[in-house]
Amino acid sequence: MTKRPKIVAGNWKMNLLQNEAKLLAQSLNNGVQSIHNDNLIVLVFPGFTLLNTTSQSAIHFQVGAQNFYPEKNGAYTGEVSIEQLQDLNLKYALVGHSERRIIFSESNTLVRSKLLTAIDNDITPILCIGETSDIRDQKQHFQYIASQLKDALNDLNPHQVAKIIIAYEPVWAIGTGITATAQQAEEMHAFIRNWFAENFNIEIANSIPIIYGGSCNDSNALELFSCPNVDGGLIGGASLNVNQFLSIIKTINGLS
Ligand code: PGA
């Protein structure tokens, strides 16, 4: 069976200025350089204006984009193309983060189009999915996650799907300080893995990385990342604090 990589990704969202990003990136790089683990991938997703600054310090971690628009170029004021990300040598991008879906009304169609554009251009997409508290209260969360997966991935071929990372991020856990319990995370990750087995094949199900996001910090990292189907984390708030973020990375490293 393929050994899945462990992934720790920091989503800086709309935070930090040049100097702050530079300091954070340098400290992160120093902290990560002593970790020798080919199976561990450390990623950081800064805002667009910070991509260059962050990339300059990124020797032992990789930098990705929080967003892009799925057209090659043209009259799309305010947008950034995938070619512009490639121009910065970026290899990863977030797709379908709940803040994009909810605040910026990104439709399932747009999410799918971004996903396909990333795959076609050799940018690894981290496809974010997750239910709101209302959906969970109504006990519709498994059904909802299956429908988000179907909307994004229907009719893709196994070769395309093999290039994706999934981030399960329950909306009620993002930035709230309320994290999913290890049991809630594990049962949903196992459900997602099984969805891949049923809709694609067992090899894809076993090899696709599924990371968890939503109020992860250095206190709950061990419990969450010890779950067999949780392959790492997408970390928001705690990734802005280098000590917290390094502590999460070291926790995952100790488990891999
Ligand atoms: P949080 O954000 O860790 O601050 O909850 C996670 C995310 O939105 O990716």
Image: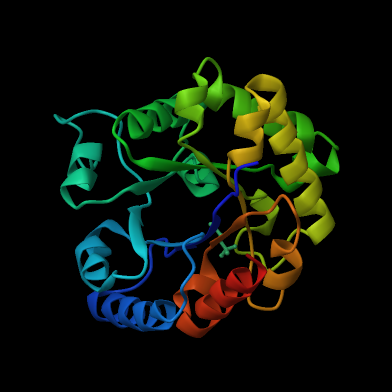
Locate residue 20: give its quadrant: bottom left
* Number of marks in the rendered image: 0
Q: Depth check: give the residue in front, 46 or 247.
A: 247
Spot occupied by residue 107 in the image (x, y as percentages of width and height):
48, 29
* Rendered residue at 70%/44% (across/down): 132
Asked whether, in this view, residue 179 is left or right of residue 87, the answer is right
Q: Residue at x 76, y 37 (%)?
A: 191
In the rendered image, the residue lying farthest to the front is: 1
- 115 on left or right of 192: left
Answer with left or right where residue 139 lies relative to residue 221: right
Whole-percent x and y of residue 228? 75, 54
Q: Residue at x 66, y 38 (%)?
A: 206
Q: Is residue 34 above or below residue 162?
A: below
Q: Work out which residue is located at the far top of the displayed protein and give it.
A: 155
> Closest to the observer: 197 or 25?
197
Q: Is residue 198 left or right of residue 126?
A: right
- Within the displayed image, which quadrant is ligand 1 positioned in? bottom right
Towards the viewer: 94 or 104 = 94
Q: Quadrant of residue 18?
A: bottom left
Q: Residue at x 66, y 64 (%)?
A: 176
In which quadrant of the rendered image does the C terminus lie?
A: bottom right
Residue 220 image offset from top left, x and y in percent = 72, 72
Identify the coloring: rainbow
Residue 246, image x and y in percent?
A: 51, 78
Name the quadrant of the N terminus. Answer: top right
